[in-house]
Image (cartoon, rainbow, N blue to C red):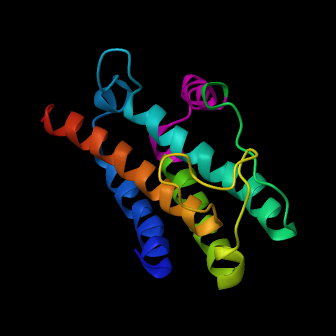
Amino acid sequence: MTQNEILHSFNYFSSWIRSLENTNEKLWFAPIADNKWSISEIIAHLFNWDRYLISEILPAVQIGNEVSFPDYDTFNKRASDYIQSGVSKSKLIDETVATRHLLVKLLHEMTIERLNRRLTVNGVSDCPRTGAHYSLIYIIKEFTEHDTHHKQQIMRFLSGNV
């Protein structure tokens, strides 16, 4: 995938999130499987990661610092906590789409060199899964794969509950 394709895919995902506005409220808050999150919690999870990319990762990349990701379980619990706070479906979707659009805008404003510059992530310079060198565009590509994984989970759940 080229850089433009990665950024396009990353941006286009917000259109799919917007399409969830008509999801039945009962399905929106129902776990997608035993011991799994609901659609609302998954979307909050994606929203939280986009916010983290904006607030922590992009600034670190801009000044040339190492990139750090938090403990995933602790961080991901915030998504469920946010849903339990009573946030509405429309507010969550609006926040998620607006945040993704801002993130993509900020990524487009970065130079190609900055997007491709080698990074150290949590003390590691190469992805242990693929062996590829870390860069911001590589991280965004991983996030597009993460988005696709969750989209497929949600689509399977919704298709089984029509």
Question: For residue 138, what is the image quadrant?
Answer: bottom right
Residue 90 on image: x %, y % = 47, 46
162, above or below 62, in the image: above
Residue 114 image-quadrant placement: bottom right
Q: Which residues are magenta?
A: 75-92
- The image shows residue 86, relative to residue 65, as above or below, that is above
Q: Main secondary structure of the magenta part?
A: helix
* Front in this rendered view, residue 160 or 150: 150
Q: Is residue 157 visible?
A: yes
Q: Nearer the viewer, residue 68 or 89?
A: 68
Is residue 153 inside the magenta stretch? no
Q: Is residue 84 magenta?
A: yes
Which quadrant: the N terminus? Answer: bottom left
> At 56% from the left edge and 27% from the top edge, which residue is drawn?
86
Q: Is residue 21 visible?
A: no
Instruction: Specify the quadrant of the image occupied by residue 155.
Output: top left
Residue drawn where x is 63% and y is 29% of the image: 78
Residue toward you, 65 or 123? 123
Q: Position of residue 112 (x, y in %)?
A: 65, 84
Residue occupying the far front of the picture: 131
In the picture, measured across the screen, residue 20 lies left or right of residue 14, that is left
Question: Looking at the image, which residue is at 58% across and 70% down?
Answer: 104
Tell me what residue is drawn at x 68 percent, y 30 percent.
71
Relative vertical location of residue 149 with respect to residue 98 in this rendering, above or below: above
Q: Is 86 displayed left or right of 124 in the figure?
A: left
- The tally of labels here is 0
Residue 73, percent from left and from top: 60, 25
Quarter of the figure with the C terminus? top left
Front-most of residues 123 and 11:
123
